[in-house]
Image (spheres, coloured by chain):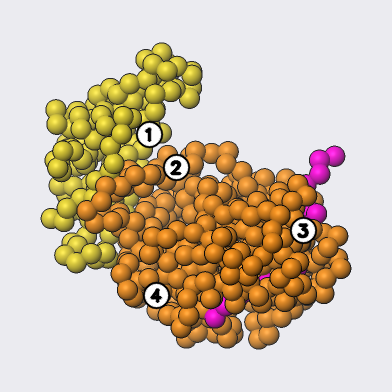
Chain colours: A yellow, B orange
Amino acid sequence: MIARTLPVIDRDNEAYWTWGRDGKLAIHRCASCEYFVHPPVPFCPRCESRDVAPQAVSGRGRVVTFTVNHKAWVPDLTDPYVLALVAIEEQDDVRLACNIVECDPETVDFNMGVEVVFEQAEDLWVPLFRPVTA
Amino acid sequence: MTRFAEKETAITGVGMSVVSRGADKSALALTVDAALEAIADAGLARADIDGIATWPGERADGSGFSPVGCAALQDALRLELGWYGGGGEAPGQYGAVFNAIGAIAAGLCRNVLIFRTMYEATARKTAYANSLLREGQRQAGPFAWYAPYYTYAAALQQALFFNLYVHKSGIRPEQVGQIAVNQRRNAALNPNAIYKTPISIDDYLASPLIATPLRLYDCDVPIDGAAAIIVSRMDVARTLKNPPIRIEAIGSSMRYRNSWTQLNELDTQAQPKVAEMMWSRTDLKPAEVDIAQLYDGFSFHTINWLENFGFCERYGAKDFLDGGHRIALGGELPVNTGGGALSGGRLHAYGAVHEACTQLWDRAGARQVKGDPRVCATSTSGGPLAGAMLLVRD
Ligand SMILES: [Zn+2]
């Protein structure tokens, strides 16, 4: 498999890219009004609270949209793969870019139920999603 | 009564370098060609230019995306300026025009040279593959959220939005393909276009899938080239040789989440509020538009703009495009009349302005739209970026 390009880590996004070590998907949440704030920033745009911190969510969501890639952008990138935006179950306007894995790309569809899995890459744990099996 | 500063400005000249799949001169030399042609076209001299603007400004990253900025051009032409500005955080590529309008209204300058230079054809031959990702480097910025997921190019990211649009609208591939077919037909009549061999819907359907549902013929063509326009204060414009092309209205808003993942409406992108703002600043209506030069980094953007400008209903583009007659040169709304970026070359919305003026000044030769077109809608876009202009020749 081709190495994943990783993000620069800062104070705000560190939990998102590392809590997978413990199998947890971290999304920032306002302690005052319970709004999920993503991308993470320690300010709630709904109630103006500064009391916003990462919290583990269920890891379940739905496929908002997706595409099946067919072009080999780099050598060896020959197999089709799925890039998707997944909305978390807790709040539909929190959308996470991801790959949908552990399935035939042709079976991925809009609104498909998915759950998080993590893949370690260097010192980070990259969130990916797979179909929820019945 | 609110005064709209754009109405006090006009495009007075345009210029374009040779546009090719591999230039025989530098990016700066191409920019000088386009700039001098625009200055002469306006009937001005270098000494009359007192402002310059560009989008997104110089990016010395080897990508060819924007190799020339204000400083390099100012020094090459030894301009003496009251104002200059180049930067990417703006309402799409036309942000440079909107900044120039503000600078003119502020009394900082009277004749602004606005340019856009691309050197992507050469860049791709040497090192670069238009990758959003750099091997071995961690990514920062808005695309960092996509970086770990093999999101190598804008085409892949944008296919996410395109797929949702197809899902919601029910548009069929042979209707989408009318954009590429129409523009190739127009390009055949444009001596400066890159691709002139006609294509059919069958050719479109046979073109390689990049990322579902995006095909190769939905993508613009990287080129080496530069385009330039002169925007002048209206009282100056009225003394120059070309009939002023008034900037009747602009849309520059950001009343939405400016994010490549959290954008409010993924399938219409950022355009609806921007188009709404533009129409709020003019008495003209969509039915009064004679021609449209709509952003076509991917053909899906053009389809979005047809709806968001109000030329057809939401999700009605499939019927509007069916058969391709309405958007053809002889149709009710000729679209991307010079071949656009898909067949003419990716000058990133400045090819579109150049073509708009070419048509409004009756200079388009074999592809000239009949009936003396006076009003052109034009746009830029891509995810959370969007800007719109309505141009009118008196
Ligand atoms: Zn709150």
Which label was assigned to residue B122? 4
Question: Are the two marked residues, 2 and 1, in contact with CB atoms closer than 8 angstroms?
Answer: yes
Q: CA distance from mark 4 to mark 1?
A: 36 Å
Q: Real-space Cα distance between discs 4 and 2?
A: 30 Å
Examine the image and state in which quarter residue A94 appears: top left
Is residue B144 toward the left or the right of residue B258 in the image? Answer: left
Residue at which label 3 appears:
B110
Q: Is residue B117 left or right of residue A86?
A: right
**Which label sits in the foreground, 3 or 1?**
3
Tell me the crowding category of disc 3: few under 14, some 14 to 19, or many 20 or more residues within 10 angstroms, Cα based: many
Q: Nearer the viewer, residue B203 or B342?
A: B342
Q: Observer-nearest residue: A81 or B175?
A: A81
Give the mark nearer the N terminus: 4 vs 3. Answer: 3
Q: Position of residue A114 (x, y in %)?
A: 24, 38
Q: Eyeballing the image, is B49 above or below B105?
A: below
Tell me which segment is drawn in magenta: B1-18
Say which residue appears at 30% left-offset and 69% top-offset.
Answer: B127
Q: Quadrant of the N terminus of chain B?
A: top right
Label 2: element kind: loop
- Under tag 1, what secondary structure? loop
Query: Same chain for marks 4 and 3?
Result: yes
Of the residues under marks 3 and 2, which one precedes in the sequence?
3
Q: CA distance from mark 4 to mark 3?
A: 35 Å
Label 4 vs label 2, nearer the camera: 4
Q: Which residue is mark 1?
A: A39
Type of amino acid at the residue the image marks with label 2:
Ser
Rendering coords of residue A108 (x, y %): 25, 49
Chain for numbered disc 1: A
Q: Which residue is mark 2?
A: B259
